[in-house]
Image (spheres, rainbow, N blue to C red):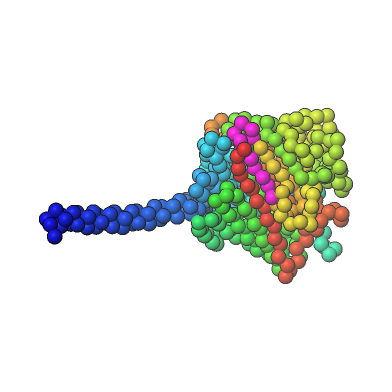
Amino acid sequence: MSILKKAFIFYCLLGFAYLSIQCKGDKKEDKILDSKIEIKKSVMISKEAFGITDDSINVEQYVLKNENGMEVSIITYGGIITSLKVPNKNKVVEDVVLGFDSLQQYTNTEYMKSCPFFGALIGRYGNRIAKGKFSLDGTEYTLATNDGKNHLHGGVKGFDKVIWRAVETKSDSLSASLVLNYISKDLEEGYPGNLNTLVTYTLTNENVLEVKYEATTDKKTIVNLTQHSYFNLSGDFSKPILDHDITINADKFIPVDATLIPAGELKDVSNTPFDFRVSKTIGQDINAKDEQLKRGLGFDHCWVLNNQNEGVRLASTAYHKESGRLLEVFSDEPGIQFYTGNFLNGTLPSKQGGTYKYRTGFCLETQHYPDAPNQKNFPSVVLNPGEKYTSATTFKFSVK
């Protein structure tokens, strides 16, 4: 064999060896990239201190964050959602729920006089109970009257003002969950029975926040739990929410008296300002000449959701055209309280500086009907020993 052929074979073998080494390196790099992708796809949950109560109890904040930048912060005081950050149509992530910067602000008694319930878990009974009284099996129970002559949102120290215990956290490539527990003692705020309550917050990589409620009791009682976040999808809390487009999947709503207690009837929304079956802005009819709007100082009513036998279904949507943010609310509850921040009056400090002014946030509170314990024609809110109360609501965010 000539020297030239030997040299050719040598260089061919050398080139093959080099390519083999490069391929192995590429495979190694691929593994590193795959690992990075897996990390990116996981939904993270972290914990940090949020403050100490006046009676020296540590309050923690849990932060759930997904791969899209959506981030939900929840504190163990009141199970409050302190912030909820979601991207707009330009992928800019902004906070879209009203709240405070510190624990001291959430516990400030002066601030609480306006009863904002920013971001809180509400119980044992969301909404109003007439004159703070109801009866079970012939026994009358008396609750605090913290809303004029009526009982509102669980009383003076409802679930929004207690310390919840974080009993479990978990996360994987699809979601992250925080499980909170609170045991309400027999006759706490006047309610019968020891009520053991679990609330699970779950954030998914589809920009969905799920809230699951569970409760059991050792004595016949009533339960109606909800979540009280105030939304402003613009991400600018100095702006009113009148330009948000709303739909509510309901043919009827519940009229109220002068103290916002249901009269017992279910009224057709047709030809009224309460018809949100087709999307319209909050501001379109909120100032219409209507006795119900006058009583609520705007919208502060419970809608009777359609298709109540179908379980979890679309209840309501909210859309802000400028930001492109769309919120869809799904629930298995029979009703939804739509409240337009009518009692915000510029006295509460905003997380963004300044104050929360009139109608700068709205609520979509999935729940049973107001005053149901005293209204025989309303769906029951009674929970017996051996039964489990369950409820589920989903807040889904997207852009269009």
The residue drawn where x is 77% and y is 52% is 334
Residue 148 lies, with reference to residue 124, above or below; the image says above
Give the quarter of the image for residue 201: bottom right
Q: 17 or 226: nearer the eye?
A: 17
Residue 33 x %, y %: 39, 52
Left or right for 75, reference 190: left
The answer to whether one can see residue 218 in this image is yes
The residue furthest front is 1
Left or right for 124, reference 8: right
Read off the magenta span. Answer: 320-330
Residue 147 x %, y %: 74, 44
The residue furthest bottom is 386
Please identify the quadrant where the N terminus is shown: bottom left
**Magenta stretch mostly in which secondary structure?**
strand
Number of numbered markers? 0
The answer to whether one can see residue 74 in this image is no
The residue drawn where x is 87% and y is 54% is 377
Q: 321 or 99: nearer the eye?
A: 321
Residue 265 x %, y %: 88, 46
Give the quarter of the image for residue 234: top right
Please identify the quadrant where the C terminus is shown: top right
Residue 321 lies, with reference to residue 182, above or below; the image says above
| The stretch drawn in magenta includes residue 321 | yes
| The stretch drawn in magenta includes residue 260 | no
The residue drawn where x is 56% and y is 42% is 86
Residue 199 x %, y %: 62, 57
Left or right for 154, reference 269: left
The residue drawn where x is 57% and y is 49% is 206
Give the quarter of the image for residue 178: bottom right
